[in-house]
Amino acid sequence: MASDVKTRTKTSSRRRQPPPLDNYIGDRKPWLNNTRRRSLTGWGFLLPAALLILFMSFIPMAQAFVLSLQTGRGTRLEFADPLWYNYQRLLSDDIFRLTLTNTFIYLIIQVPIMLALALVLANLLNNPKLRFKALWRTAIFLPCAVSLVSYSLVFRTLFANDGFVNDMLMSIGAIGGPINWLGQAETARFVIILGLLWRWTGYNMVFYLAALQNIDHSSIEAARMDGANAFQTFWYVTVPQLKPMIVLTAILSINGTLQMFDESWALTQGGPAHQTMSMAHYLYEVSFQKNPNFGYAAAISYVILMLVAILSFIQMKVGDKRD
């Protein structure tokens, strides 16, 4: 009899024990497991930035596309007839075709030279035996931190008719008289390309220096033991390992050159006769100067966007050589 009472007491006490907390939470909220909780936490951190990008980038892009389908001056805008009138007008705009040519001249000449120089400088400054590496790296990177107004004034002074460049070339007998560097189309484009190289080579060099820190040095040592010289080691061992970074800097440089405004505006004012004007500079002129036409300027901006997208896609496809 006593044993039966003890058994019933134990059974009732077991029944009165609450279920484990994990089972209780799982029964009440089966959807909120650890994986989903981490996912929701991640989205909670990403949501503010995603909303900012949506409202600051994508919505204005959609509004700009709608604006590119409109014609008129100032705020007196109405939809064009046909809707693609502004894009059709671009095909017959001589100034736009000239600015497109100028931009691609800068792109084709300046970007390869700049990336090659940045790659060579990064490889030289990555030498562990080089003294004062921090000084050289800072000196080469510093131009991209210089303000546009300061460096444009320096370049305009250097390449003036009575500037240092003409004086130096005449002193060594390279030229017989002063060259009007900023007054001729070819020489003015050369000055802009030189300014772009001076300002942005160090910026790309920093990317390559960062990538060089992650290269496996055993592969370089193996190439040297196999008898490869410095150039062969650099070209066949180092450069292939830098390909992802080269693709990235190429995309950034192409995008920046297609949207170039500062140098065209500050160095040459687009002259002489629009011969050095970039597409972004022409967009600014159409938007805010000489009978502002926001619809036509929006069409120009979308042409720049399409060029950036197409060239970036080509770069990514060419650079993506996965096995």
Image (cartoon, grey):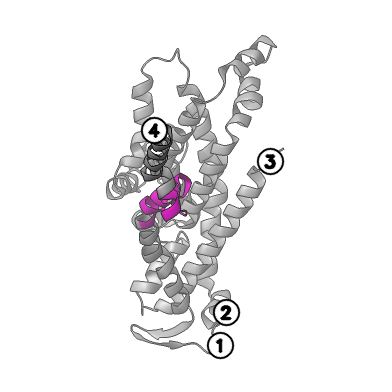
Asked if the residues shown at circle 1 and circle 2 are in contact, with their CB atoms under 8 angstroms apart, the answer is yes
Secondary structure at numbered mark 3: loop
Region rendered in magenta: 25-47
Q: Which mark is residue 88?
A: 2
Q: Amino acid at mark 3?
A: Lys
Left or right of 265 on screen, residue 85 = right
Inspect the image, locate mark 4, and give the three-letter code of the amino acid beneath it: Ala
How many neighbours does mark 1 have within 10 angstroms: few (below 14), some (14-19), or many (20 or more)? few
Q: Is residue 68 magenta?
A: no
Dot 1 or dot 3, earlier in sequence:
1
Position above or below: 225 against 203: above
Residue at 55 percent across and 64 percent down: it is 306
Query: Label 1, label 2: how many angstroms apart (C-alpha)?
Result: 9 Å
Nearer to us in this view, 170 or 238: 238
Front residue of 26 and 187? 26
Amino acid type of the residue that numbered disc 1 sits on in the rendered structure: Pro
| Residue 29 in sight in this render | no
Regarding mark 4 in the picture, which secondary structure is present there? helix
Residue 103: image x %, image y %?
Answer: 51, 57
CB atoms of marks 3 and 4 within 8 Å: no
Q: Quadrant of residue 231?
A: top right
Q: Main secondary structure of the magenta part?
A: helix
